Image: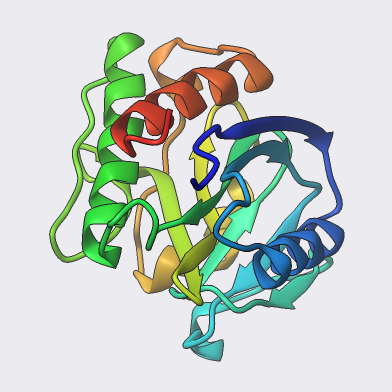
Amino acid sequence: MPEERTIIEYLGRSDYQNTWDSMKSLTHNRNVNTPDELWITEHAPVFTQGLNGKAEHLLTPGEIPVIQVDRGGQVTYHGPGQLVLYCLFDIQRLELGVRTLVTRIEMSIIELLAQYGIKATGKDDAPGVYVEEAKIAALGLRIRKGCCYHGLSLNIDMDLSPFERINPCGYEGLVVTQMADFGVKPGLEHTGRELAGILIRNMNCE
């Protein structure tokens, strides 16, 4: 019988490359009995460019490193004060298609934000979560052997200026926002654990 317990780990501030390598290793080595995991973390400033990322969306990265990664999507920014939640799910075991997976992740973020009085929505043509027209959370996944890794980032209380050095997620002029802009500054670990709990419920993987 497959193990259904989901492990939640708080990594603190982690090195992006090392964390990515660990995700790939876990996904490569997992089997039908491997529990799903959710990793709560934040990173030092880094731009990550997705598999189909176009160089034209990197405007002026300057001293911030750029890492080419194996998730979908274009370029995004990670930095202190941004919650990154890595989702290591066996979606085959959960009987979820990719579109359903993405929708449930977005719904979970929207549900979390609603608890803090922030009304957010998704967009059919642009993955992620938005408050009006400003993006507050980004999404990027890799599917391998029926399992996913990478995950989501939610802006809590951070320096948003590095987003001006890129076309966020490949959209020129896209405005980026954060929870702090709405007077909400919850702790990163606390928010990560809240969101992890919502995700587990919405993925039916308690």
Residue 34 % position (x, y) = 63, 51
Q: Is residue 80 left or right of residue 58?
A: right
Residue beneath the point at 73% across and 37% down: 80
Q: Is residue 98 left or right of residue 164?
A: left
Residue beneath the point at 80% across and 35% down: 11
Q: Nearer the viewer, residue 200 or 94?
A: 94
Query: On the image, which quarter does residue 189 sit in?
Result: top right
Classify 164 as above or below 10.
below
Query: On the image, which quarter does residue 38 sit in?
Result: top right
Residue beneath the point at 55% across and 13% down: 185
Q: Nearer the viewer, residue 193 or 115?
A: 193
Q: How many marks?
A: 0
Residue 4 % position (x, y) = 49, 37
Specify the quadrant that holds the C terminus: top left
Q: How did the renderer colour the structure?
A: rainbow
Q: Is residue 185 left or right of residue 200?
A: right
Residue beneath the point at 72% across and 61% down: 26
Q: Is residue 191 left or right of residue 60?
A: left
Q: Nearer the viewer, residue 61 or 92?
A: 92
